[in-house]
């Protein structure tokens, strides 16, 4: 489906005229963006039809990926690259007087996610379509994304992120696919011809309206679907003319309560308000998604018995785990199956991905809340729990003492991870270490009962977005060296190894990195007014702000360097620029204080003429996918310093590696596998191991105060928090101080400080040897093929879902 530049220009001016009633000379960059969007939509729509048609006529098994978050990033660049129109469009726009970069920059990032888990979902959709696999996303169309972060006086301020203000060119509203979701009310149990039936009365009715986004594959004919649900009120039950004003106000209250359901994304691991609303969102997603899948299924197949043969449902963490009781409800109450049959079908259809082992992040819901909001679902969960506990009692006598820890309902709470494990046929962790911890520690009793369910699928990232699109000069350089097969088979990057020590290639790699750093420095200056030295080491820490991700450890290293430089202004060191980007969950007080500490440290250094010659700190606000795409290609050092055992996998680590940055990190998550691939010489690891951390947690032998007392450097750094040298307000950083001392430093910041500083020293020495450093850099790129989400998705496809690639045949008329 190729388009000449001439044809592109023609279509552009026609579309512009029919849509905006404008001539090319008068069009704004935003109108140009919309116009290109519409041209692409037309191409995509045809392929979309073909894809749906092929899946239907082949009776393909399909997978649905349920996730509360999809952190997509901009889609125009993806769609241009995938359809092979990037060059045509670039040239066409130029001839028409537009700049491609500027036009692409008009697109709003849909901020429908919070971090790793949401971005993973987006990478997976990209890989599914690119590998010609029948797999779709199912999520919520939040009217406002997470939030837009502004830094005001060094503090995070949250503004609503109204990403839909200019209408979203990629979505199509599918009113005809609307379904109803019911909340509240009571259940009446009646016996009808020998069978118990459950009648739901007095419920609140919510309309779920789907908006579909096409997900295109890389230069193929596949277009899968991301279906996002929006909550709308129904007016059918209100008779405005016949009733009085009071009822009208009731209607307004109802409308408000319904619309809230798809308004904001609540980050999952903060102390947030509106837990009830979050639960409502989860059920809304699950019920709407399943009803729709089942309806379509019944149109195509004679019996629901075939469900596990034709459909797989993957749940991204426990947030959509109500899929299990909801599917049971539909099979029992709507399809009239027996409990046993319904349970068999459900547990052969649903698969669960675990993303955390931290107990405070494992979801639970109060029984009373679920009972009130979802009375029938509660009954079903209760029954699942009864049967599961009975099974444990009878079939696993050795586990009888464990039943209270394994029950789905205990101490007034519903444990969603337990529900997810019991009700699915596959439970996967997201990196080897993480899966081992699940099996041997956190979920050990479940592993004993269901060993066959547990498996590992190490995360991955789409190398198309994170290299091809984010870093075109590096991508070209690689292709120049080893040909272009790596684009379709990222494992081929390994052939770069033979150039790791090649002086000419190294020089080119260095040139690309330098150009990217210069571009980032320019961007930083435009955004913040800060001038950074583009010859300094770019040391980058970008990710959600969280205690376990230990941005604080990084700051402590910086404050330590500050003291060293003050002591010895002529200290011989390679200048460094520390770059941070992070959003803190709105209710997470500690995380917000760490942001304040970073910005305060940045200001203090900027004001110090001696120190600022050697180090600089920059905090870039509103970290999101587009910002990550700017920063990562320009990074020398990738900070992956979570407390070992806490980061399930991480995917940021993979993006950096792919772009030739060197990791400094703990042996946590996928860092372990990165180290396995590149070898210990090409990564800087330090600190406690996961085993150490778990042992400390059991023995309670860690005393942060002893570390504090025993290390003068730590005392000097910590004292800066409270002695007025950072802030006139001497309580500003007291909470951080006490978290580390009185609360015994849950994340082992002080414990790992010494080895972190040592690793940073070694890293600096390595940086001073350019040929050695570049060799490390190239070695990292060469081994990054394993971390393509294409590899991850192929594993899910063959080992969990049993789905197969299908080449889409063109049935509709195209050119
Ligand atoms: C990749 C990515 C993440 C995940 O980063 P980690 O370092 O793995 O925590 C979060 N947010 C955005 C915008 C990303 O692109």
Image: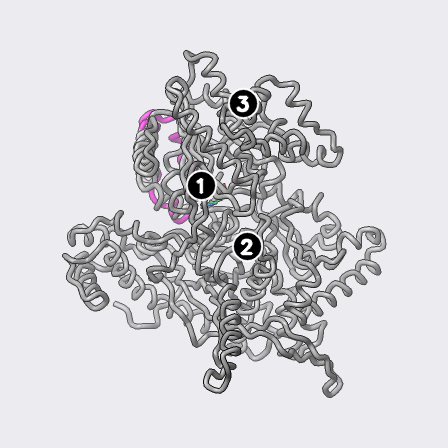
Q: Label 1 CB, ligand 1: below 8 Å? A: yes
Residue at point 16% right, 59% down? 24
Count of marks, rendered view: 3
Task: Report which residue position mark 1 lands on.
Answer: 655
Residue at point 14% right, 57% down? 25
Indicate left or right for 790 with 315 as reference: left
Disc nearest the viewer among 1 and 3: 3
Question: What is the CA distance from the residue labelled 1 to the residue labelled 3?
Answer: 24 Å
Point out residue 117 in the picture as x, y percentages from the top left corner: 52, 50
Instruction: Using the image, tell me which numbered label, if any, was put on residue 757.
Output: 3
In the image as oriented, which residue stretches furthest toward the front? 245
Q: Quadrant of residue 655?
A: top left
Task: Report which residue position mark 2 lands on.
Answer: 796
Q: Where are the magenta residues, as a range?
A: 481-507
Residue at point 56% right, 44% down? 588
Q: Quadrant of the C terminus?
A: bottom left
């Amino acid at each position: 489906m190729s388009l000449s530049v001439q044809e592109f220009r023609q279509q552009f001016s026609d579309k512009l005229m029919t849509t905006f009633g404008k001539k090319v000379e008068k069009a704004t960059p935003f109108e140009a963006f919309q116009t290109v969007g519409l041209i692409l939509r037309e191409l995509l729509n045809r392929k979309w039809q073909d894809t749906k048609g092929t899946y239907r006529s082949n009776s393909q098994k399909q997978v649905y990926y349920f996730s509360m978050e999809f952190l997509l990033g901009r889609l125009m660049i993806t769609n241009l690259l995938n359809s092979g129109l990037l060059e045509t469009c670039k040239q066409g726009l130029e001839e028409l007087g537009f700049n491609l970069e500027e036009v692409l920059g008009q697109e709003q990032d849909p901020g429908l996610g919070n971090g790793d888990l949401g971005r993973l979902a987006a990478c997976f959709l990209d890989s599914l379509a690119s590998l010609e696999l029948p797999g779709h996303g199912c999520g919520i169309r939040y009217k406002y994304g997470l939030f837009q972060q502004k830094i005001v006086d060094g503090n995070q301020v949250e503004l609503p992120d109204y990403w839909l203000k200019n209408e979203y060119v990629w979505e199509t509203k599918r009113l005809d696919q609307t379904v109803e979701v019911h909340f509240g009310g009571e259940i009446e149990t009646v016996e009808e011809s020998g069978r118990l039936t459950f009648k739901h009365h007095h419920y609140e009715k919510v309309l779920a309206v789907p908006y579909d986004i096409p997900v295109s594959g890389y230069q193929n004919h596949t277009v899968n679907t991301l279906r996002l649900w929006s909550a709308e009120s129904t007016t059918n039950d209100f008779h405005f003319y016949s009733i009085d004003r009071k009822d009208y106000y009731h209607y307004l209250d109802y409308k408000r309560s319904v619309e809230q359901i798809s308004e904001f994304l609540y980050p999952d691991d903060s102390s947030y308000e509106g837990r009830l609303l979050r639960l409502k969102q989860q059920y809304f997603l699950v019920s709407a998604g399943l009803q729709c899948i089942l309806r379509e299924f019944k149109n195509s197949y004679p019996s629901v018995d075939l469900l596990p043969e034709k459909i797989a449902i993957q749940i991204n963490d426990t947030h959509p785990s109500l899929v299990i009781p909801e599917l049971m409800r539909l099979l029992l109450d709507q399809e009239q199956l027996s409990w046993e049959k319904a349970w068999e079908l459900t547990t052969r259809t649903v698969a669960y991905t675990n993303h955390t082992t931290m107990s405070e992040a494992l979801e639970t819901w109060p029984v009373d809340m679920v009972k009130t909001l979802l009375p029938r679902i509660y009954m079903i969960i209760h029954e699942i729990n009864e049967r599961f506990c009975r099974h444990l009692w009878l079939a696993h006598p050795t586990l009888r003492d464990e039943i209270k820890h394994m029950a789905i309902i205990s101490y007034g709470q519903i444990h969603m991870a337990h529900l997810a494990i019991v009700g699915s046929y596959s439970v996967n962790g997201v990196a080897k270490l993480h899966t081992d911890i699940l099996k041997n520690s956190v979920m050990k009793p479940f592993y004993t009962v269901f060993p066959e369910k547990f498996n590992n699928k190490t995360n991955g990232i789409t190398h198309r977005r994170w290299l091809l699109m984010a870093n075109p000069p590096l991508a070209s350089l690689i292709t120049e060296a080893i040909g272009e097969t790596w684009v379709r088979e990222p494992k081929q990057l390994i052939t770069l190894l033979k150039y790791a020590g090649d002086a000419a290639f190294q020089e080119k790699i260095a040139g690309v990195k330098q150009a990217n750093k210069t571009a980032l420095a320019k961007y930083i200056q435009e955004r913040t007014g800060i001038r950074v030295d583009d010859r300094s080491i770019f040391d980058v820490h970008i990710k959600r702000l969280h205690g376990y991700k230990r941005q604080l450890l990084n700051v402590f290293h910086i404050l330590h360097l500050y003291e060293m430089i003050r002591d010895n202004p002529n200290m011989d060191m390679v200048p460094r620029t520390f770059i941070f980007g992070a959003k803190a969950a709105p209710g997470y007080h500690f995380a917000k204080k760490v942001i304040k500490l970073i910005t305060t440290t940045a200001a203090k250094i900027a004001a110090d003429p001696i120190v600022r010659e050697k180090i600089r700190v920059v905090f870039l606000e509103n970290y999101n996918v587009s910002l990550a795409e700017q920063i990562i290609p320009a990074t020398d050092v990738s900070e992956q310093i979570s407390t070992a055992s806490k980061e399930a996998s991480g995917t940021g680590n993979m993006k950096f590696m792919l772009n030739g940055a060197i990791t400094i990190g703990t042996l946590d998550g996928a860092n372990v596998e990165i180290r396995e691939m590149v070898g210990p010489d090409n990564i800087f690891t330090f600190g406690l191991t996961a085993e150490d951390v778990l042992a400390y947690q059991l023995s309670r032998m860690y005393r942060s105060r002893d570390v504090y007392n025993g290390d003068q450097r730590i005392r000097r750094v910590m004292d800066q928090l409270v002695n007025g040298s950072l802030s006139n307000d001497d309580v500003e950083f007291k909470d951080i101080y006490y978290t580390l001392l009185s609360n015994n430093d849950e994340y082992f910041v002080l414990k790992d400080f010494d080895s972190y500083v040592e690793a940073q020293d070694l890293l600096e020495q390595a940086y001073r040897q350019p040929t050695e450093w570049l060799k490390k850099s190239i070695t990292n790129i060469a081994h990054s093929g394993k971390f393509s989400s294409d590899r991850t998705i192929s594993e899910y496809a063959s080992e969990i879902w049993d789905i197969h690639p299908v080449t889409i045949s063109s049935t509709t008329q195209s050119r």
